[in-house]
């Protein structure tokens, strides 16, 4: 009970700080969470608990998003969906970032890497995590200036715009710690939000954020083969009918089918990866610890509602 009370006190303290920041900044974020949001996430949690229902819903959505109608849906939304342009941040964060190279690599391989976030941005984000002490963060760009600048960086948004073929929607940002040592994990608190249960550990899988989407991953700790590196299967962002039905792919099956197209992304803190997550990917097993930021842009899907706050451990 002591740990539960500690979590609740931490949550209330964090909410008070957020409320104060919101008032100071003139924020109009809704408080409390809407009934619709609570229903949405209660349904998600229920589906995640029913594995057969989860698999069925994933296959149905996979067929709808990645199936034969995908090219026509993409073309329709590129021509007829008029998203509001994102507010751009013009700080020069990535002077060596080649927009055309990244977009070409995304179209051909489903991913692109080779650029670094400046150390001062990494330090600011790590400091933000240290000040809150959570394991996972939902939309941290609303609270952390460094993340917001990355998400709205002019070159990053231009890459998203060219790859998606339309003004991008900033759909979601997340920060997540991964630990190999349970003692290390106990040093941080759960997310402030209820979480759908995770599944299938470190198996390969694909996501269906939208008919076309772009995710940016940023390592905020040094990542070697023992630190849970991100692994992507090159060129699998476009799926055959058979692959759509293979939501989950084990290591042996992936190695047999894709061989040297499986790419493990290693790098020091600040390493950036651009990826279309309809490609098969996974996080390798973490034996040390890893902190990673993800930023999602989509073609037409509305952002999810804010998650309900955690009220019990």
Image (cartoon, helix red, strand yellow):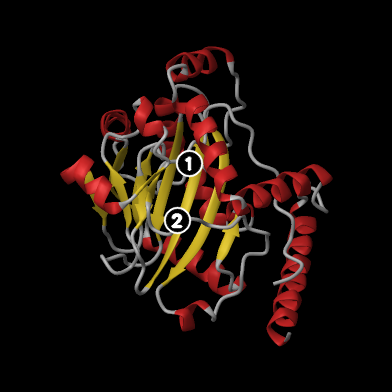
The image shows residue 239, relative to residue 201, as above or below, that is above
Of labels 2 and 1, earlier in sequence is 1
* Quadrant of the rendered image containing residue 9: bottom right
x then y, percent, for residue 241: 37, 25
Instruction: Please name the residue shown 77% across and 46% down the image.
Output: 39
The image shows residue 101, relative to residue 77, as above or below, that is below
Q: How many marks?
A: 2
Residue that numbered label 1 is attached to: 90
- Horizontal arrangement in the rendering, residue 150 relative to residue 30 (left or right): left
Return the residue found at the far left. Answer: 260
Q: Give the secondary structure at mark 1.
A: loop
x then y, percent, for residue 60: 54, 31
Instruction: Please name the residue shown 26% across and 65% down the image.
Output: 225
- Horizontal arrangement in the rendering, residue 241 relative to residue 184 (left or right): left
x then y, percent, for residue 93: 40, 49
- Horizontal arrangement in the rendering, residue 77 relative to residue 306 (left or right): left
The answer to whether residue 302 is seen in the rendering is yes
Residue 200: which disc? 2
Q: Give the secondary structure at mark 2.
A: loop
């Amino acid at each position: 009970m002591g740990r539960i009370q500690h979590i609740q006190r931490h949550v209330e303290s964090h909410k008070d700080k957020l409320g104060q920041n919101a008032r100071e900044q003139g924020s109009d974020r809704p408080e409390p969470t809407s009934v619709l949001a609570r229903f949405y996430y209660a349904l998600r949690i229920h589906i995640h608990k029913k594995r057969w229902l989860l698999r069925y819903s994933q296959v149905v959505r996979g067929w709808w998003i990645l199936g034969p109608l995908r090219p026509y849906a993409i073309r329709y939304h590129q021509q007829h969906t008029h998203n509001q342009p994102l507010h751009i941040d013009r700080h020069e964060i990535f002077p060596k970032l080649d927009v055309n190279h990244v977009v070409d690599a995304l179209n051909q391989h489903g991913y692109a890497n080779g650029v670094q976030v400046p150390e001062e941005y990494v330090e600011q984000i790590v400091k933000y995590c240290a000040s809150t002490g959570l394991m996972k963060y939902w939309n941290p760009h609303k609270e952390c200036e460094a993340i917001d600048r990355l998400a709205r960086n002019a070159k990053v948004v231009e890459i998203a715009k060219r790859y998606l073929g339309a003004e991008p929607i900033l759909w979601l940002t997340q920060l997540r710690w991964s630990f190999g040592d349970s003692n290390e994990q106990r040093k941080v608190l759960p997310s402030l939000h209820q979480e759908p249960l995770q599944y299938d550990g470190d198996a390969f899988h694909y996501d269906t954020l939208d008919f076309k989407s772009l995710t940016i991953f940023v390592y905020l700790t040094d990542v070697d083969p023992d630190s849970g590196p991100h692994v992507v299967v090159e060129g699998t962002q476009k799926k055959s009918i058979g692959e759509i039905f293979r939501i989950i792919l084990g290591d042996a099956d992936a190695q047999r089918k894709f061989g040297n197209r499986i790419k493990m992304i290693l790098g020091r803190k600040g390493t950036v990866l651009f990826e279309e997550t309809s490609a098969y990917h996974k996080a390798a097993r973490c034996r040390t610890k890893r902190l990673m930021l993800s930023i999602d842009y989509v073609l037409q899907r509305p952002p999810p509602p804010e998650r309900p706050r955690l009220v019990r451990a």
